[in-house]
Image (cartoon, coloured by chain):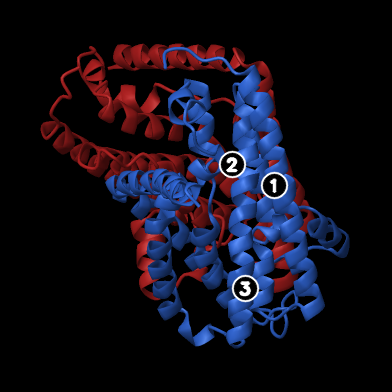
């Protein structure tokens, strides 16, 4: 009984450390309002272009299993999911490892590296997600006559799947960033990740456009579960059993990458040397 | 005048040699990037093939016309990434670290220095391979352009690069006021991506902004239209006029920005 208040205090102290990281990250993010606007405009240009492409396509009827309004809605909703699920600490993590800053920011801190990095990303997304939502709203107004919604449950399930997608893409990106413990240049790894996400993940075109053989590959690889699965749920393209299978695959990939992260962190910090920090 | 041009050419060749030697310090990384860039091109063309496979035509452009457009845009993007974009990315660092002062005190044009100092070679192989793919698509599409059309296509591509470089230079110059913006290359990439689609897809206000204000039409649509015999030689006058006007505007903007520049006490 005497240890219970101490345990609660300790727990509050630990949570305060994590909240502190969120607060600092949020302050840093607000100092970089300009880059957020640039990314926003870049995303908008791409989405608006795809909307015009499908509007001017001559095909009638179903296009890869989608109607034209569904395809246009795909890119509008996809814009929101890009901002909501874009948790990629790869870029700054590899730079901190390369420069040695990670010694001061992570290695000597009595805090879980996974959750500390997560809190830093959370600070960024507390700003980025509302901004992305506003942008999506703007594009929605532009394309409102073509927009489709299939009811409340697909939206709720799609959001649930996208929360899992956040943890999946975050863990995946962490593992890629930790390669910097062993390799000086890992930019090509990032290019391969984005190639996978665009081709097998549905960010370029819907996964349904791929050939049957490539669709089977997409169902095995993790990329579909980063982006395409929530959209497929939203557009009611999956049966309840298929939704269940997709959610289970997301969970399995999350477990895989979290385990891989722990292994790489343990081995990487043992092999790592830095100076000046 | 000729002596000055030769001097700048020799300077540029020195920069290129220095950058190439820097790339060769990490040979495996250099070779991997060449492979990744070529792989990306093939994936993009595959995606374009799938889009046209589903859509049949887009704004009146057929599948092979569209693939030629995509390949041309990738040649354009490759050359931009070799000569222009590394300098755009570097410029924001020069401003934030106060290192622009070291550029301004040198006895050469500061615009020349900031625009040509860096050259990245990993996109050159991609730019060299893509013309062969374009030739293949021309044959498959039943197009047989004349020598004049091929020459005109090349000239229009070069003019388009010059126009786009001036556009990027104007964007880059805004760093004098917006010093925290370090990701202009993502905006450049997004604008480049606009060029892979026929400019005719855009209508209304979007057409004015995305086709004329942002010179996306010069990336691939104008050169490919000439190559396929869809436009007349008067397009050269239009492209030359825009190239000259874009240079004048970008240079005046640069001079205005320099007048407002205050050193970061380097």
Circle 1 or circle 2, nearest the eye: 2
Spatial CA distance of label 2 from label 3 is 38 Å
The circle on residue A158 is 3
| Chain B tint in image | red
Q: Residue at x 59, y 12 (%)?
A: B25
The circle on residue B134 is 1
Q: Helix, strand, or loop for circle 2?
A: helix
Which sits in the foreground, A230 or B79?
A230
Q: Residue at x 49, y 42 (%)?
A: A116
Which sits in the foreground, A192 or A157?
A157
Q: Residue at x 69, y 47 (%)?
A: B134
| Chain A tint in image | blue
- Disc 2: host chain: B
| Relative to B230, residue A160 above or below | below
Are the residues flagged by discs 1 and 2 in contact, CB closer than 8 Å? yes
Spatial CA distance of label 1 from label 2 is 10 Å
Counting residues from the start of the chain, the first of labels 1 and 2 encountered is: 2
Residue at which label 2 appears: B75
Q: How many marks?
A: 3
């Amino acid at each position: 009984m005497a240890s219970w208040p101490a345990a609660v205090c300790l727990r509050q102290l630990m949570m305060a450390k994590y909240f502190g990281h969120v607060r600092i990250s949020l302050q840093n993010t607000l100092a970089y309002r300009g880059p957020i606007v640039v990314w926003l405009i870049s995303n908008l240009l791409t989405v608006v272009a795809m909307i015009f492409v499908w509007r001017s396509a001559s095909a009638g009827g179903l296009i890869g299993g989608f109607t034209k309004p569904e395809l246009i809605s795909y890119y509008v909703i996809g814009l929101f999911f890009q901002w909501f699920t874009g948790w990629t600490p790869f870029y700054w993590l590899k730079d901190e490892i390369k420069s040695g800053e990670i010694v001061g920011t992570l290695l000597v801190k009595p805090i879980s590296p996974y959750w500390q990095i997560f809190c830093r990303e959370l600070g960024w997304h507390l700003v980025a997600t509302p901004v992305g939502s506003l942008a999506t709203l703007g594009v929605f107004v532009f394309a409102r006559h073509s927009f489709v919604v299939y009811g409340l449950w697909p939206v709720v399930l799609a959001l649930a799947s996208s929360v899992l997608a956040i943890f999946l893409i975050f863990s995946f990106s962490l593992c890629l960033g930790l390669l910097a413990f062993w390799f000086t240049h890992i930019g090509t790894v990032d290019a391969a990740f984005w190639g996978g996400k665009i081709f097998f993940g549905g960010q370029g075109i819907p996964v349904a456009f791929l050939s049957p053989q490539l669709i089977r590959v997409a169902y095995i690889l993790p990329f579909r579960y980063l982006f395409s699965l929530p959209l497929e749920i939203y557009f009611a393209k999956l049966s309840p059993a298929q939704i269940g299978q997709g959610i289970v695959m997301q969970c399995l990939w999350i477990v895989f990458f979290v385990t891989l992260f722990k292994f790489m962190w343990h081995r990487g910090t043992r092999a790592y040397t830095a100076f000046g920090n | 005048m000729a002596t000055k041009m030769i001097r700048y050419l020799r300077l540029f060749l020195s920069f290129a040699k220095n950058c190439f030697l820097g790339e060769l310090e990490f040979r495996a990384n250099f070779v991997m990037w060449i492979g990744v860039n070529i792989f990306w091109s093939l994936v993009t063309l595959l995606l374009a093939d799938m889009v046209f496979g589903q859509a049949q035509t887009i704004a009146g452009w057929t599948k092979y016309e569209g693939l030629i457009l995509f390949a041309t845009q990738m040649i354009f993007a490759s050359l931009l990434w070799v000569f222009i974009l590394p300098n755009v990315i570097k410029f924001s660092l020069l401003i934030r670290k106060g290192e622009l002062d070291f550029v301004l005190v040198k006895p050469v044009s500061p615009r020349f220095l900031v625009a040509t100092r860096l050259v990245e070679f990993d996109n050159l192989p991609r730019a060299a391979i893509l013309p062969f793919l374009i030739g293949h698509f021309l044959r498959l599409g039943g197009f047989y352009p004349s020598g004049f059309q091929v020459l005109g296509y090349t000239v229009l591509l070069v003019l388009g690069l010059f126009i786009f470089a001036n556009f990027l230079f104007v964007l880059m110059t805004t760093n004098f006021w917006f010093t925290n913006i370090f990701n202009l290359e993502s905006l450049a990439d997004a604008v480049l991506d606009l060029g892979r689609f026929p400019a005719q897809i855009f209508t209304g206000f979007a057409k004015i902004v995305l086709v004329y204000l942002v010179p996306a039409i010069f990336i691939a649509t104008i050169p490919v239209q000439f190559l396929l015999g869809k436009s007349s030689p008067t397009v050269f006058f239009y492209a030359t006029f825009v190239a000259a006007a874009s240079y004048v505007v970008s240079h005046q903007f640069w001079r205005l920005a320099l007048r407002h520049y205050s050193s970061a006490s380097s």
